[in-house]
Amino acid sequence: NLWSEAIGALNNYLELPGSTWPNERCYAMRLLGKCYENLGDLVTAQRWHRLACIEAPNTREPWVDLSLACYRRHMWAESYAAAKSALQITDKALVYTMDPSVWTEKPYDLASISAWHLGRKDEAIVLCQKALEFNPKDTRLMSNLVKMTEAEDG
């Protein structure tokens, strides 16, 4: 819970002349976003999540983090766009900054929920079905799919 101290250390890292690897810089920016979220500064957190996407746009992690941050703020259009950007990335770099959760149902789930709120009902259902392919026993995903299909049918 030393969020403020972590912010100082992460900013110091980003200012180092040797801080040049985009994946590592992106990781630091993602952590800055997490720090600010935990401090309750969601605007600054979102700025860091966006900067992480700019730093390493060809990795899923920052896009999923941005989508989740937008989801928490009910910013459906940006959450949807970020999740869809993540899903377009198919090259899974096996580096230490890689987060395995972004290669599971998570981006599909975020895209599905956001699509639903944007009125993209059919797409939301397809995305939820895809999320369930990764985690077929997830009761929340199953419940979401039932609610979505019932709303579409009724």
Image (cartoon, rainbow, N blue to C red):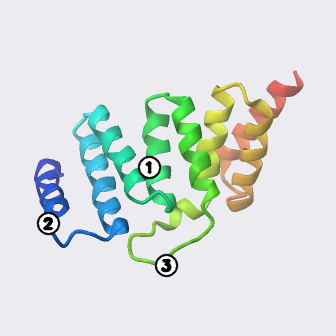
Q: Which quadrant holds residue 104?
A: bottom right
Q: Earlier in the sequence, mark 2 or mark 1?
A: 2
Tell me which amino acid carries mark 3. Leu
Left or right placement of residue 40 versus residue 136 in this view: left
- Please name which of the two marks, 2 or 1, marks the residue nearer to the observer: 2
Binning the other alpha carbons within 10 Å of mark 3 as few (below 14), some (14 to 19) or many (20 upward) gives few
Tell me which amino acid carries mark 1. Asp
Mark drawn on residue 94: 3
The picture places residue 47, in percent across and down from the top left corner, at: 32, 40
Q: Which quadrant holds residue 112?
A: top right
Binning the other alpha carbons within 10 Å of mark 1 as few (below 14), some (14 to 19) or many (20 upward) gives many
Taking 70 as reference, is 31 above or below it? below
Question: What residue is at 55 percent from the left and 30 percent from the top?
Answer: 76
Q: Judge whether residue 82 can be spotted in this image.
A: yes
Question: What residue is at 78 percent from the left and 44 percent from the top?
Answer: 126
Q: Earlier in the sequence, mark 1 or mark 3?
A: 1
Left or right placement of residue 87 versus residue 4 in this view: right
Left or right placement of residue 75 versus residue 45 in this view: right
The picture places residue 87, in percent across and down from the top left corner, at: 63, 55
Residue lying furthest bottom in this view? 94
Q: Which quadrant holds residue 121?
A: top right
Question: What residue is at 67 percent from the left and 45 percent from the top?
Answer: 141
Tell me which amino acid carries mark 2. Leu
Query: Badge 2 is on which residue?
Result: 16
Quadrant showing the C terminus: top right
Query: Badge 1 is on which residue?
Result: 65
Give the CA separation, mark 2 to mark 1.
Answer: 24 Å
The picture places residue 73, in percent across and down from the top left corner, at: 43, 29
Residue lying furthest right in this view? 153
